[in-house]
Amino acid sequence: MFSDIRSYVDAAVARDPAARSRAEVLLLYPGVHALAWHKLSHWLYRHSVFGLARFLSQLVRFFTGIEIHPGAHVGQGVFIDHGMGVVIGETAIVGSDVTIYQGVTLGGTGKETGKRHPTIEDGVVVSAGAIVLGSITVGANSKIGAGAVVIHDVPAGCTVVGVPGRVVARSGVRVREADLLNHGDLPDPVGRALEHMAARLNAVEAELHAVRAALQQTRALAADGGAVVEEAQANEYRI
């Protein structure tokens, strides 16, 4: 237990540029407090002291804004940055060296029994506001973008963004069109729709510019024609 708590402090010092010392992290970081108290509530939960374990987790939630169910398994070196609004469900498994930012939910879909929360493998980064739902696995060293909603398994080393979450990069390399037959590498429909709209807007602007130029030319010709008519009328009057 104390080894795990020390790993949480070390992780905060290593990954947060604002951390000045281990003493500051230990005393003032709510993510470290929540993880430390979770070790005790998880121990109580494993020994079937469910009521006290849940009471302790709710008390920690009140003070830190971070809700970790006593049944969740959390590995070493986890760092919860800021942490307000983080929710980790009962059957969630969080591996070692995982980084979780504020507003993250590791929840269930409400339709499953048994293992109904995500498994987050080692080295994953879950950005602010991301939602990972269901009994799915996020592969090691993957990155979940801010605000993404992930409902399917994510291969190791991938970057996922959007709603619903889509793989946009694998091992740091952007997913190519040639790889789109891989189910984990589906295209970005929202991005493609925006590109189509931008191309259409450019075409409409070009057509509008051509219409304006033609209209100006017509007006110029009409003005020239009117001047010729007026001059002819004046000559006829003089005659």
Image: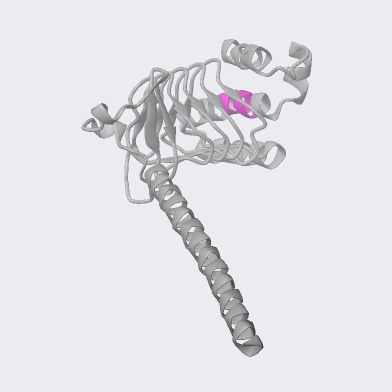
Residue 184 in picture, x, y percent from top left: 29, 31
Q: Is residue 118 left or right of residue 28?
A: left
Along the line of sight, the residue nearer the viewer: 159 or 100: 159
**29 up-or-down from 148: above or below:** above
Quarter of the figure with the N terminus: top right
Residue at the extreme front of the image, as rendered: 239
**115 up-or-down from 77: above or below:** below
Question: Could you tell me which residue is drawn at 64 percent across and 34 percent down?
Answer: 83
Question: Could you tell me which residue is drawn at 39 percent across and 44 percent down?
Answer: 164
Question: Could you tell me which residue is drawn at 34 percent across and 34 percent down?
Answer: 136
Residue 216 in picture, x, y percent from top left: 55, 64
Quick check: can you spot residue 47?
no
**50 up-or-down from 194: above or below:** above
Q: Is residue 37 left or right of residue 144?
A: right
* Range covered by the magenta-colored residues: 34-39
Residue 7 in picture, x, y percent from top left: 59, 12
Along the line of sight, the residue nearer the viewer: 90 or 233: 233
Quarter of the figure with the C terminus: bottom right
**Residue 141 forms part of the magenta stretch:** no
Q: In the picture, residue 8 is in which quadrant?
A: top right
Q: Is residue 62 left or right of residue 138?
A: right
